Amino acid sequence: MRIDVLTALPGLVDAPLRHSILERAQEKGVATVRVHDLRTYAPGKHHQVDDRPFGGGAGMVLKPEPVFRGVEAIADAEGEADEIVYLTPDGECLDQSTVNQLSLNEHLILIAGHYEGIDQRVRDQLVTRELSIGDYVLSGGELPALVLIDAVVRVLPGALGDSSSALTDSFQDGLLGAPAYTRPAEFRGMEVPEVLRSGDHQRIARWRDEKRLEKTRNRRPDLLPDAEDAEAS
Ligand code: SAM
């Protein structure tokens, strides 16, 4: 999969791509992520990417030209993207099923807004999907873009050392994840449950399922109708 990110602050997106699973996924050729500075596509001597809002009001708005030109340059070089996503607090709330769906695409372009947001004509004409990472407002779309990239890349085949681990994460089947323990078996008087040390894989799987259901009932009962339907089928 290829992901292109258009941003006025490329440095904010670059660094996390050079660590851990995102770095390894790129080294293995599972994903290619490229970050583009909107200033490169901004005409004029000053490469200005933002301007004051028509009608007045606080803050600056990202101008349409650099975003249109950036998307067109990426399309010329790499072909049309399957989705052009604008990260915005008033978008559809990102969840695991949207992440899984996005991971089936070959090419995504992500647009990070900044300041007051982005010229509405970009949203009307270019953007195919608007996504929010939660009901709160951040200063820019760079962190939301990274959240999306991390969530999508980790479910791509080959991204994780053990690809089955993404399948047992919270939300993949509508349940929260099971508790995890590692060595030592006893720490300050707290023992790892005996079943996890038993070597009996069926008992371990049953125990994990019970714990996942218990945790979901306690913390996120809103998830359960879906999960219980899935279990019955
Ligand atoms: N004026 C905008 C509004 O009221 O919806 C908020 C703009 S916000 C300060 C600047 C940028 O941060 C947005 O254009 C968007 O790209 C990004 N952003 C902020 N919060 C976000 C969220 N919860 N999810 C996704 N993107 C977000």
Image (spheres, rainbow, N blue to C red):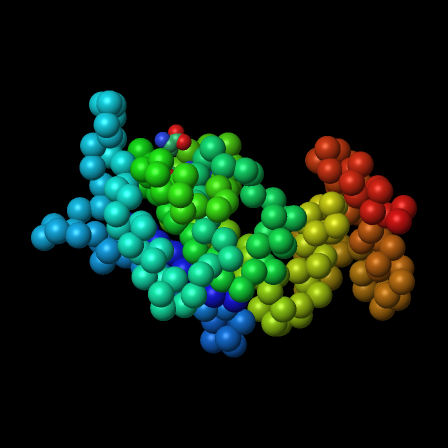
In this view, 66 is above or below 22 = above
Asked which quadrant contains residue 54, the reply is top left
Whether residue 87 sits left or right of residue 53 in the image: it is right
Q: Is residue 192 visible?
A: yes
In this view, 14 is above or below 9 = below
Q: Quadrant of ligand 1?
A: top left
Pick whichever, 124 or 49, lies toward us: 124
The structure residue drawn at horizontal position 39% and vertical position 56%, both measured from the top left corner, is 5
Pick whichever, 126 or 209, lies toward us: 126
The structure residue drawn at horizontal position 47% and vertical position 71%, both measured from the top left corner, is 26
Where is residue 233? Give x, y as percent: 89, 49
Asked which quadrant contains residue 37, the reply is bottom left
The structure residue drawn at horizontal position 60% and vertical position 44%, both measured from the top left corner, is 95
Where is residue 11? Give x, y as percent: 30, 57
Where is residue 14? Give x, y as percent: 35, 60
In this view, 111 is above or below 93 = below
Where is residue 19? Give x, y as percent: 44, 65
The structure residue drawn at horizontal position 66% and vertical position 60%, both measured from the top left corner, is 166
